[in-house]
Image: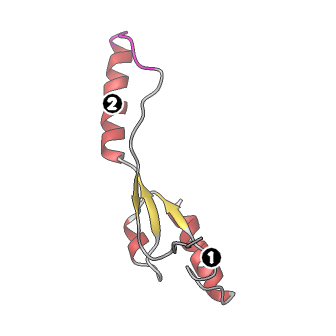
Amino acid sequence: NDLMAIGALKAFAQLKVRVPEDISIIGFDNIPFSDCTYPPLTTIAQPTYLMGQKAVETLLKLIDKQKIKKSVEFMAELIERNSVIRWEV
């Protein structure tokens, strides 16, 4: 998640490992602090509002003993910032 990735950014900075020149780091969650790091953290955003909405709808269907889907898919979004670099091969 983003908190672990932010911890990795700090640890690599202490070890003098350059991000993204030496290593790329990507988080997951897109927390508000992820764009306040150095370098700003590339992350994957989830549609958390939509996920919560769908969870409530599913719960209400369960209470009413209606059929529910076994799984629900949500689209995640890559938020490109500066903690990754594109390598040319």
Crowding near pointer 2: few (<14 within 10 Å), some, many (20+)?
A: few
Give residue 55's position: percent from left, percent from top.
37, 32
**Residue 26: percent from left, percent from top:** 53, 65
Q: Position of residue 9 (x, y in %)?
A: 57, 77
Percent across and percent down for residue 59 are 37, 24
Where residue 74 sits, quadrant-wise, is: top left
Q: Per the image, is 65 magenta?
A: yes
Q: Residue at x 54, y 59 (%)?
A: 1
Q: Which residues are magenta?
A: 64-69
Q: Amino acid at mark 1?
A: Ile
Residue at image point 31% right, 26% down? 57
Q: Nearer the viewer, residue 78 or 52?
A: 78
Q: Nearer the viewer, residue 43 or 4?
A: 43
Disc 2, SS: helix
Element type where label 1 sits in the image? loop
- At 47% from the left and 83% from the top, the residue drawn is 38
Residue 20 on the magenta segment: no
Q: Could you tell which of marks 1 and 2 lies nearer the N-terminus?
A: 1
Q: Which mark is residue 56?
A: 2
Q: Residue shown at 36%/24% (left/top)? A: 58
